[in-house]
Image (cartoon, coloured by chain):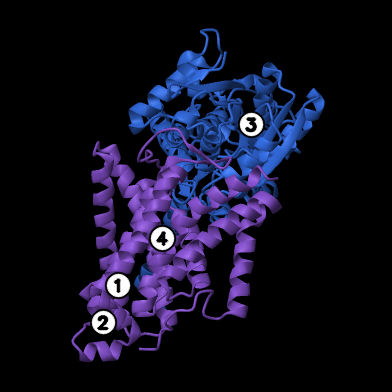
Amino acid sequence: MITQAALARRLTTIALAAALAAGLAASGRPALGQGGAIRIGAVFAVTGPASSLGKPEKDTAAMLAAQLAASGGVAGRPVQIITYDSETDPTKAVLLMKKAVTEDGVAAVVGGTTSPESQPMADYAMSAEIPFMSVAASTTLSVPARAWVFQMPQRNDVAAATAMQYLVALRVTTFAFLYRNDDFGQDGLVGFRTYARQRGMTVVDTEPFAATDTDLSAQVARARIKNPQAMVVWSTPPTAAIAAKNIRQLGMPVPILESHGIANRAFIQLAGPAAEGVVFPAGKLLVAGKLPAGDPQKALLERYARDFEAANKYAANTFGGHAYDGITMLLDAFRHVGPDKAGVREYLEHLRGFVGTGGVFAMSPQNHNGLSTKDMVLVVIKNGAWDIWR
Amino acid sequence: MSTLLPQLLLTGLTTGSIYALVALGFVLIYSVTGILNFAQGEFSMLSALVCATLLAWHLPLGAAALIAAAAVCAVGALTERLAIRPASGAHPLTLLIITFGVSMAFRGIALMLWGADPYALPEFTPGPALVLLGGVLIRQAIWAIALSLAVVAALFVFFARTVPGAAVRACADNAFASRLVGISPRRMSLLAFTLSAALGAVAGIVMTPITGATYDMGLALGLKGFVAAVIGGLANAPGAVLGGYLVGLIEALTTGYLSPGYGTAITFLVLLAVLFLQREGLVHGARRRPA
């Protein structure tokens, strides 16, 4: 027979345990209900081979998080940005995204620094039905458009189309195409072949090379025999710089057109004098100070660059800009429709005239990137600095 | 195609001279200790990145190169002391795996310190390239070829004419007998690692003005150097140099005449062919006896 006192004690214990469990659950589970913090998951390659891209992305997220904390969030609700490091590993990237969605209860995910990371994350976004803002540039991420996947950078095919404008302006009829033999380079090759056919130009030579190659003079020598009127190089440093050097070393005086992959200081340092006169397509951030006063992005780009440099003590770059666009676009959606996933997706899909660092986005159900050649400029390297071409 | 050949040969000689230096590093350590040091490429990477950093601190190129090489020699010695010596007497496979671990550690540290961006070094003597038989040879390539030959000559003199050199050779020949006459195989092992690091440092610093330097350059470089060393006989210094030039030329010629994608594949096919047909490499040397 249980005495009254014992029963009371037992009930107290049960009540305490229940309260404790509830408390644990509350701290472990995010409050998703009205009034709690809205969470954004940010999965970037902060370390690993793509850290030079992922670090500015993470630093941009941290800067925005600080601004959100100061301003009190969006529509009266605090916004938290939870950052994860994928270590440039596609498997880790998608696992961290799952953790963000299932354990940390985020309303949307930004990230996927490299295309190999973004691809499985996009697949997961489709199955988990969560808005995913990819910061990688592969054309296949938003062509064809997928319901839950949005792409922030200017796509590789848009960059190729912008680059092609240079060859059109030069009125060349033949060019040689040197490319890194991977997704990035082959993306470019397909683009250039197509545009060349449309414009009546001839690709007289195509020369693949590996990302680890240390000398490309054999490829350049092969191309030289075909007498191209221009050399196009589709890669990133160091090979992009080695190609430019080898072209000049082998005495080819023709114009050199490179990809948006050289939009960093490393190219100018590595290529040295061979960088002079090289033209490449890029987002407007690189030449923000030189944009005409009427440019819709000018004010935003200058503000982002200023804020970023003040917070991080190094210069802002386009990669951080993609993270900025992904997060601010989500904030805009939260402001209008709240953190409802389906609502956010619907809102983003019809977002038009959104001014970001990558361009003025014009989304549609068929186009989840929303950027065009209008959002890129041709940049020329002059005296070791960037300038708008013409 | 005749206009292509001179350029391909010159390109092959340039990259070949770098491979030769790395291959020599492999041979030096292998012949003294019996260890295949897969951290060899990382010595080049470290020297190049340290040199670039010192240059950014406004040191003159010569001083930066010397300090970087000295620092990497110290790294080589430390590698021997801290990673190889504690496991001395272990199975060769264990030691090989240790060197893999060391190389991964160096790569990870370099990624933390320098990031993934490539670094540049200026050419030693800037100026227009030389035109040779219709091919173009840049000045830095002349440096690379000359330095690799000079280093081989210096090593030859060291081994043939000096007492420490003779001691290393004795140790490579028969570690037990050399201990009987008072040569410490341990000290020779330390010397071999330090010298190999120096060779790697020279390769790294001389190639960077041509190629740029990244934290992950050591892996591909070490692999090519290893192939060159094996083709040359693995315990044979002149063979390693020949192997280096051969690998460079094969790469350039396959890139030029077949397809750029095949360079590495053909190189490894040649390696397999050499191993099948001539176990001790193309150049017969003194075979290493088990110590």
Q: Which of marks 4 and 2 is nearer the N terminus?
A: 4
Q: Please tell me the numbered disc located at residue B159.
A: 1
Query: Given this view, does label 4 or label 3 mark the residue nearer the observer?
Result: 4
**Residue type highlighted by circle 2:** Pro
Residue B261 visible in the picture: yes
In the image: residue B265, left or right of residue A387: right
Q: Badge 3: how crowded within 10 Å, few (<14), some, or many (20+)?
A: many
Residue A15 lies in what quarter of the image? Answer: bottom left
Decide if residue A117 is on the left or right side of residue B1. left
Inspect the image, locate mark 3, and give the three-letter code of the amino acid beneath it.
Met
Q: Which mark is residue B21?
A: 4
Callout 1 and callout 3 share a chain: no
Which residue corresponds to mark 2? Answer: B185
Chain identity of mark 3:
A
User: How far apart are labels 1 and 3 at the CA level?
Assistant: 49 Å
Q: Position of residue B272 (x, y in %)?
A: 61, 73
Q: Which amino acid does label 4 sit on?
A: Leu
Chain for disc number 2: B
Please give the letter of the chain rendered in purple.
Answer: B
- To the question of a shared chain for discs 4 and 2, the answer is yes
